[in-house]
Every structure is written in C-alpha cells, then in structure tokens.
Image (cartoon, rainbow, N blue to C red):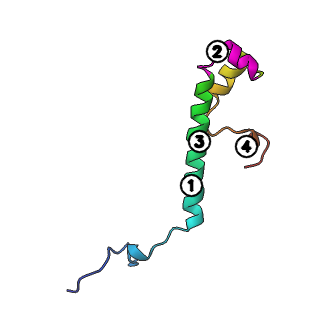
Amino acid sequence: MSQMSSIETISGRPISRLRIPGGFTKTAFSYLKDWFVRRRTRLELLELSDAALEDLGLTREAALAEAMRPFWDTESRRKGRY
C-alpha cells in the first residue's frame, strides 16, 4: 500500500489540487463584508438622536424603516442591478 501525499476526493482527485478561483473567494468575502457593514450601519441609525437624524435629512420613521431592511436589500438590488 502506498502512502498518499494528500487526501483524495470521491473522484480520486487530490484535494491539494482542487482550486477555488481567486475571483470567487474575493467576491464572496466582499459580499460578506458589505453585508456586515450594511447591517451595522443600519442599526446605528436607531441610536442617533432626532437632531442627528434631522441633520442627515431623515425622520425617526425613515431611520426605523431603513434599519429594519434586511442586510442583503440594497438600492441597486431593488432597481434590478446587482
């Protein structure tokens, strides 16, 4: 029995040779980062005073509506662009 230098997948192809395209990984992490930032900033709207919201041109109701949107919901997504 010979020793294997890497674990083999079901197809017999060593895992060490499997490659995930760099672009895919970079894109996935970029989406995750954007989602976390979007969620955090939307929740931070809830902590702003009425005066601070007014400075931003927002009402308390608008800030609440924005904060309650899901993290994946973006303006470009609603317009059909991703």
Using the numbered discs, state the Cα–Cα distance from disc 2 to disc 3 in whole angstroms. 24 Å
As helix, strand or loop, the secondary structure at mark 3 comes to helix
Q: Amino acid at mark 4?
A: Arg
Residue at 55% of width from left, 68% of height from top?
21
Name the spot of residue 70 as percent of width and height, x first: 62, 33
- First in residue order: circle 2 vs circle 3: 3
- How many other residues sit within 10 Å of disc 3, few (<14), some (14-19) or many (≥20)? some
As helix, strand or loop, the secondary structure at mark 1 comes to helix
Residue 49 tag number? 2
Residue 35 tag number? 3
Using the numbered discs, state the Cα–Cα distance from disc 3 to disc 1 in whole angstroms. 11 Å
Name the spot of residue 32 as percent of width and height, x first: 55, 47
As helix, strand or loop, the secondary structure at mark 2 comes to loop
Nearest to the eye among marks 1 and 4: give it: 1
Residue 28 tag number? 1
- How many other residues sit within 10 Å of disc 2, few (<14), some (14-19) or many (≥20)? few
Q: Amino acid at mark 3?
A: Trp
Nearest to the eye among marks 2 and 4: give it: 2
- How many other residues sit within 10 Å of disc 1, few (<14), some (14-19) or many (≥20)? few
- The range drawn in magenta is 46-56
Q: Are marks 4 and 3 in contact (CB under 8 Å)?
A: no
As helix, strand or loop, the secondary structure at mark 4 comes to helix
- First in residue order: circle 1 vs circle 4: 1
- First in residue order: circle 4 vs circle 3: 3
Q: Amino acid at mark 1?
A: Ala
- First in residue order: circle 2 vs circle 1: 1
Residue at 65% of width from left, 20% of height from top?
64
Residue on which disc 4 sits: 77
Q: Is residue 67 above or below residue 22?
A: above
